[in-house]
Amino acid sequence: MKFLCVDCDKQMSFEERQLPGDGTLAATFKCPKCGRVVAMLTNPMETQLVSSLGVEIGGRTVPAQPLETVRKMVSTGREDAFDDGASGVGRGALWSSEATERLSRVPSFVRGMVKRIYADYAKERGIAEITPAVMDTARAELGLEGM
Amino acid sequence: MPPIRTYHELTEADRSGLPEQIGAQRKRVAERLAGVGRVIAVMSGKGGVGKSYVTAHLARALARSGRAVGVLDADLNGPTIPRLLEIEHAPRPTSPSGIEPATGQDGVRCISMAMLIEDGAPLAFKGPTAESFVWRGAMEAAALRELLGDVAWGTLDTLLLDLPPGMQRYVELCDILGAPPAVLTVTIPTPESRDAVRRAMRAAVERGSKLLGIIENMVGGQFAGAAGDDLAKEFGIAVLARIPWHPTPDTWSALGACL
């Protein structure tokens, strides 16, 4: 799918993606010539179709994790299906009690993967303790809406 | 209004890079399977003919003969391969480079949805329930792609893919692999099976798959007919094995020697 600014005959470029959390998706595109911005809104079924392709609108900010779609999208997955080697809390960074509590609310099937993403984020930036604030920042920077 | 340029005429770089993301997925599968000597799809087009049973015992026979063998249980909704390979559930070791396959009897490497979903639970996906048929097939294809591309198969002589009944998974497989896999066909002797399997074999031929041969299963019991011979004659290939109701290890070894 592409967007064309008809007046300028220019392909519009991706600007921003938003996931409101109700299964819908909003993506904005901007004309590089006149600056006009349009938003594409998808219904839950269309959003699901995009998810099933294993692609990220706006581009990937983190590499695909092994069995990413299975982990994220299967609702009947085993809690102990994967040994992600992340049982040691933080994998280098400490987790505050608030961050640990927040992590516990992540569905168990993907918790290991989410934990690793935050831990890797902290490690790469030399962050000693993972707090909710760090998680918010990582989520915004890495495009991890919903995690 | 002036003529609007077509999709393909818009060639400016796009930050989403969706075609590049799809390309990366295919590259990942290709790289993962670079160490696999051959990929063989075991298919039928007919349910209940013993595809999984044949796949598992063929894999074990090949492994006993010294070959490195893997089995991907592509029957995502009715996975049975782990039980046939006598694999107990255990969490799959994971690293950024992939998931380790399980190892079954005789050293056969295996991945199956049975290892990833709860015992007795159906394969269910998160998402809108209304008209889920629109996206469910795509989700299953994505799962199949990940089982091919994200499992650290290592070096294998043969990777057997146990397909479910019907043709959908075979078509998905062709798209994911980028080339049609070789096909091993399983039937039982009955004319009903022959007619269903014929359709699957024709679809495989039309897609360009090499037909390796036919395995006629459940021979010698109450299933009367000559499906194996009929299909062999029609498609110009061999019946590689006729599996009796109570096969012995020699039965499987003989089949393995044909491949």
Image (cartoon, coloured by chain):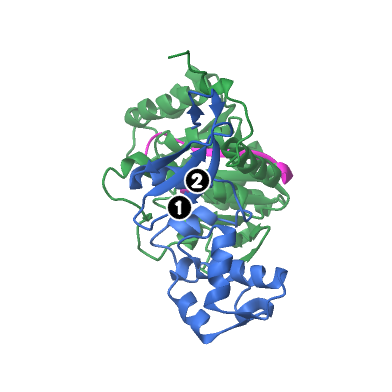
Which colour represents chain A? blue
| Residue in front for this viewpoint, A88 or B204 | A88
**Does A9 appear in magenta?**
no
Asked whether disc 1 touches disc 2, contact meaning CB atoms under 8 Å apart, the reply is no
Residue at the image point whose x is 64% and y is 33% from the top: B13
Give the class, few, some or many, for how many residues have Cα within 10 Å of label 1's Cα (few <14, many ≥20): few
Marking on residue A1: none
Residue under numbered circle 1: A18
The amino acid type, in three-letter code, at marker 1 is Gln
Report which residue position mark 2 lands on: B142
Q: The magenta stretch spans which residues?
A: B34-53
Q: Position of residue B52 (x, y in %)?
A: 47, 48
Co-location on one chain, circles 1 and 2: no
Location of residue A126 by image quarter: bottom right
Image quarter of the N terminus of chain B:
top left
Give above or below for B15 relative to B103: above
* Chain letter for mark 2: B
